[in-house]
Amino acid sequence: MQNLIPIGSNKPQLGSKTFGAHQAITLMEGLLTMKEDKDEEVASRLLSRVYVFVVMWSVGAFLELDDRSALQLFMRERMGEVLDLPESDPEDTIFDFFVDLKLGEWQHWAGQVEEYIYPDSYTPEYSSILVPNIDNVRTDFLINVVARQGKVRLFFPTHVSTAWQAVLLIGEPGTAKTVMIKGYMKKLNPEQYLSKSFNFSSASTPYNFQRIVEGCIDKRMGNIYGPPGGKKMTIFIDDINMPLINEWGDQITNEIVRQAMEMKGFYNLERPGEFIHITDVQYIAAMGQPGGGRNDIPARLKRQFTIFNCTLPSNTSIDKIFGEFLLFFDIFAGTITPLLDLSGLSRQFTLLLP
Ligand SMILES: Nc1ncnc2c1ncn2[C@@H]1O[C@H](COP(=O)(O)OP(=O)(O)O)[C@@H](O)[C@H]1O
Ligand SMILES: [Mg+2]
């Protein structure tokens, strides 16, 4: 599978073939649990299309737009006969389609994008506004497919816990990673789910991380800890790649994150040797693309996550986002708004931003 990634691409690549296969299986499991049982014809069409979708979002999950086009070309030319690919216009790629889990048909993501309705009873905080577009609707769906899966895991000889799958969003700054994850957490029912967000920085230490997590959990029984009130909790670590890499090349803060995720807990700092088992906690993280002075994270941490790359919005999306904002400034209505269509003014504003 790794051979499908265009050679010469400098984008983060799959660590190994098993890594891609693991992501594919996680997605397949998530999608198949969401499908409804149908007659045999729909079921077989659905399966072959879900397979293509899963390949796109495992092998192709880290790719930028140009590499996505290259992958689609490769799949159409070399595997068009055997794979059930969606018919697309020249300006679309197969990444713009998803499988309708009821009918087993390919559908364009554009059909899922709802109109943004500016609230009239309050002024929304600028940084929390998310104008729906193909990119964020699709990423939200992928987060849900992965993060809402509770896999039963034997994590303690006498205790079976359900572990939610972890998601990591990577992408250039401004690709709405933070806003999308916060939006996902906001939609969780607060009666059953708690959430906690924090940012990593170059000053974050393993101690800080452990203390933050310990602050979110209560003792349940014995050495088993979990979020208060028997609820589940999503912990969002933003900028997870920021912690310092020491002179030996280790990013120690992320080693404890890895331990917390892999072993479902960490060692008690007050009582050495005693392990704190943590249940009902899910991790979601975001980070900028590594490179250009930005750190990567250890591969052993990366493999705990299902990873999706968020691409910069297309020019049409940028026009739409700014268009929605400007519509609500009466002073601009009739002057600036028409210019948007004529000159792509919003795009130029965006490009001028640091
Ligand atoms: N589709 C969108 N609609 C509205 N605002 C957006 C959209 N995409 C990005 N933004 C804005 O861009 C800014 C950067 O988003 P953010 O989530 O912080 O990006 P990232 O975490 O990827 O660097 C935020 O203020 C966000 O509101
Ligand atoms: Mg961010």
Image (tube, rainbow, N blue to C red):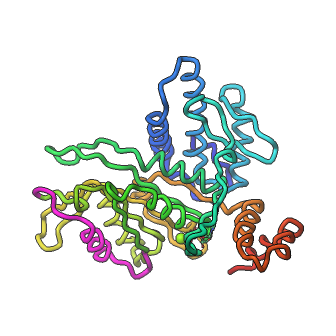
**x 15%, y 58%: residue:** 220
Q: Residue furthest front?
A: 121
- Please indicate whether residue 68 sits to the left or right of residue 213 in the image: right
When asked about the image quadrant of residue 171, the answer is: bottom right
- Please indicate whether residue 40 sits to the left or right of residue 113 in the image: left
Image: 87 above or below 169 = above
When asked about the image quadrant of residue 104, the answer is: top right
Task: Choose between 83 and 5: the one closer to the eye.
Answer: 83
Q: Quadrant of the C terminus?
A: bottom right
Q: Residue furthest top?
A: 40
Q: Position of residue 63 (x, y in %)?
A: 63, 54
**x 59%, y 75%: residue:** 126
Q: Position of residue 304 (x, y in %)?
A: 40, 54
Task: Choose between 202 and 167: the one closer to the eye.
Answer: 167
- Which quadrant of the figure shows ligand 1? bottom right
**x 61%, y 43%: residue:** 56
When asked about the image quadrant of residue 116, the answer is: bottom right
Task: Choose between 136 and 83: the one closer to the eye.
Answer: 136
Q: Position of residue 334 (x, y in %)?
A: 84, 73
Image: 273 above or below 336 = above
Q: Quadrant of the N terminus?
A: top right
**x 33%, y 59%: residue:** 233
Chain part drawn in magenta? 200-222
Q: Is residue 321 magenta?
A: no
Image: 72 above or below 104 = below
Q: Is residue 209 magenta?
A: yes
Number of marks in the image? 0
Q: Position of residue 298 (x, y in %)?
A: 43, 63
